[in-house]
Image (tube, rainbow, N blue to C red):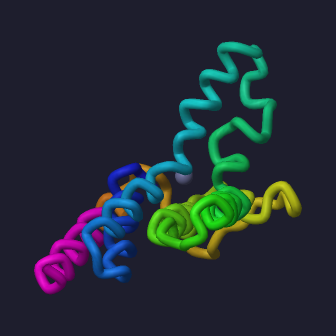
Amino acid sequence: MIGLTHLAFGLLSGELFKSKEAILLSGVGSVLPDIDVYSGSIATKITFASGKNRYLKHRGIMHSLTVPLLIAVIYFALFGNMLILPFVSGYISHLFLDMFNPSGIPLFSPFYGKKIKFPYTVKTGSTQDYVLSVLFYGLFFLFLFQLF
Ligand SMILES: [Zn+2]
């Protein structure tokens, strides 16, 4: 999925928490996993490892449930509350959508390396991707006007 689709779905899932701050946190969480697009290319430039580092490459460890769960545990240990939950929810919404990608994601990495995907897939940047994006933004604004 393109970043706009992830953001729309993250904002939409943030509405479950019924607060503006939660919607914002969920939106940030929903785009964070694709930071590995940049870390992978930077690592490649530094190490000349061209995609060989499975932790830094795109749809590597950042696309695993391990990262949002670790963030939640660390946040809870530091602050004693779960205010980070909308962020984690947005992050997981990204992983959910990326399981529609034809290449799948390593959902349980580093414990189980096999990439997981749904039987029905959507190519990044395809017509279906844009249709979903429009649909998610439509639903987001529809619910937004009902919430506030
Ligand atoms: Zn992704």
* In magenta segment, residue 144: yes
Q: Is residue 97 magenta?
A: no
Query: In this view of the protein, which residue sits in the foreground, 27 or 122?
Result: 27
Locate the N terminus and report the quarter of the image it occupies: bottom left
Residue 116: x and y in percent read 72, 66
Residue ID at (63%, 41%): 58
Q: Nearer the viewer, residue 146 or 123?
A: 146
- Residue 121, visible in the rendered structure: no
- Quadrant of the image occupied by residue 20: bottom left
- Count of marks overlaid on the render: 0
The reply to whether residue 69 is visible in this rendering is: yes
Q: Quadrant of the C terminus?
A: bottom left
- Specify the principal SS of the magenta part: helix
Relative to residue 87, is residue 50 drawn left or right? right
Quarter assignment of residue 102: bottom right
- In the image, taking residue 9 as reference, residue 90 lies left or right, namely right
**Residue drawn at (69%, 37%) of the image:** 57
In the rendered structure, the answer to whether residue 127 lies left or right of residue 46 reads left
Q: Is residue 2 shown above or below 77?
A: above
| Residue at x-position 56% and y-position 74% | 120
Q: Which residues are magenta?
A: 133-148
What residue is at 36 percent from the left and 58 percent from the top? 7
Q: Give the x, y percent position of residue 115.
A: 75, 60
Outermost residue on the right side: it is: 111
Residue 75 point in image, percent of width and height: 61, 60
User: Residue 113's spot in the image, x, y percent?
Assistant: 85, 57
